[in-house]
Amino acid sequence: MRTTRRGFVGGVSAAALLSGGAAYAQKGKYDVGANDTEIKIGNCIPYSGPASSYGAIGKAIDAYWKAVNDQGGVNGRKVRFISLDDGYSPPKTVELVRQLVEQEKVLALFNTLGTPTNTAIHKYMNQKKVPHLFLATGASKWGKPKEFPWTMGWQPDYHTEAVIYGKHIVATIKEPKIGVLMQNDDYGKDYYEGFREGLGKDVGRIVRAVTFEVTDPTVDSQIIQLKDSGADVFFNITSPKAAAQAIRKAADIGWKPVQYLNNVSVSVASVMKPAGFEASQGIITAAYMKDPTDKQWDDAPDMKTWRDWMAKYLPGANLADNNNVYGYAVSSTLHKVLEQCGNDLTRDNVIKQAGNLKKVAIPLLLPGITVNTSPTDFYPIQSVRLQRFKGETWELFGDVMSNESA
């Protein structure tokens, strides 16, 4: 709806609207950020800076809502997606999120990326009582509705994922000597703590753990340190740029450990190919989404739909970049929430519906993995399968499992 200079909205005086007069009958119940024709959603993501490869997610989300709007929107309302570049800088995230909440007055914040960046706005979003939904980070702290009832993650949490790696190493490798490279922030520490838990009584098998800053130009010196430690197993806790560098450097110096790579850096396009396919052979990671380079999904209906959507709405994007799969799948989850809201587009109802997803089959998730939430369970996806890099793609192995079943 558009406000004119004379204070009229859609031909009806603002005074009449504010007084709740019968001059205008809305078809729904709204908070700021929504009305009869529009739903306004905010987002921050690094289109520039050290984590800029994740900018593909923001572009995919924007394309998703354009497609939805072309088909009539959600319950007759168009979605306006406002995505801003925070460069993966927490101070910038704070500034831009205040802009989105206080000036743009979005109904909800959606899929803002990064553990340190979301940590910087965590308390603010809950104090403002604005839905802080389906964050693009697997930190375990996003699933605590008692303390932070307005914040919810989406992907499997880092702690659980790392527990699974630790248990797999203990079960499959005799007397491992483990080296760890981790980003020096909450994201890296969350993975590392879960990994230590998964190793259990074998935690002493970690012979060296080294850190790096996300702004460091390379991780070459850290990889040399890990090789020199005698480690024959390598857990790589890095975002895409550093992940590719670490894999490449290990190959260049002739270090050939059994490699485990965190799920946030499994893109064939932005990690495995830049690192070199030969250097990437045998790397193990967790998966919960279908990889577009895995030919077993070529005839899957959801993959065919995704490829058609890519061709129409992201024609220049890389089909091998699973960030485009991620953006589509997470947007499908918010789409479901908004559909469930019906004509009650208040912030209270948005978070209520986000916490009421029961075995929802989201496009492009692996078979057997669904989205499930409740008022006391803010971890939407809790299952993964392991996969190993072979040739130029990932190859799944084993069963669907969670922390408890690992």
Image: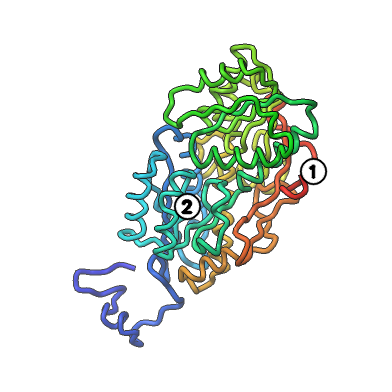
Q: Quadrant of residue 373?
A: bottom right
Mark 1 residue type: Asp
Q: Position of residue 268 (x, y in %)?
A: 61, 30
Is the image coloured rainbow, by chain, by secondary structure, or in one colour? rainbow
Q: Position of residue 315 (x, y in %)?
A: 51, 38
Q: Which residue is mark 1?
A: 399
Q: Quadrant of residue 376?
A: bottom right
Secondary structure state at the residue bearing disc 2: helix
Q: Does residue 259 show up?
A: yes
Q: Is residue 102 left or right of residue 230?
A: left
Q: Is residue 241 left or right of residue 384?
A: left
Q: Residues within 10 Å of mark 1 (few under 14, many from 20)?
A: few
Question: 244 or 198: nearer the eye?
Answer: 198
Screen quadrant of the C terminus: top right
Residue 123 higher or lower than 299, as above or below: below
Screen quadrant of the N terminus: bottom left
Q: Which residue is mark 2?
A: 66
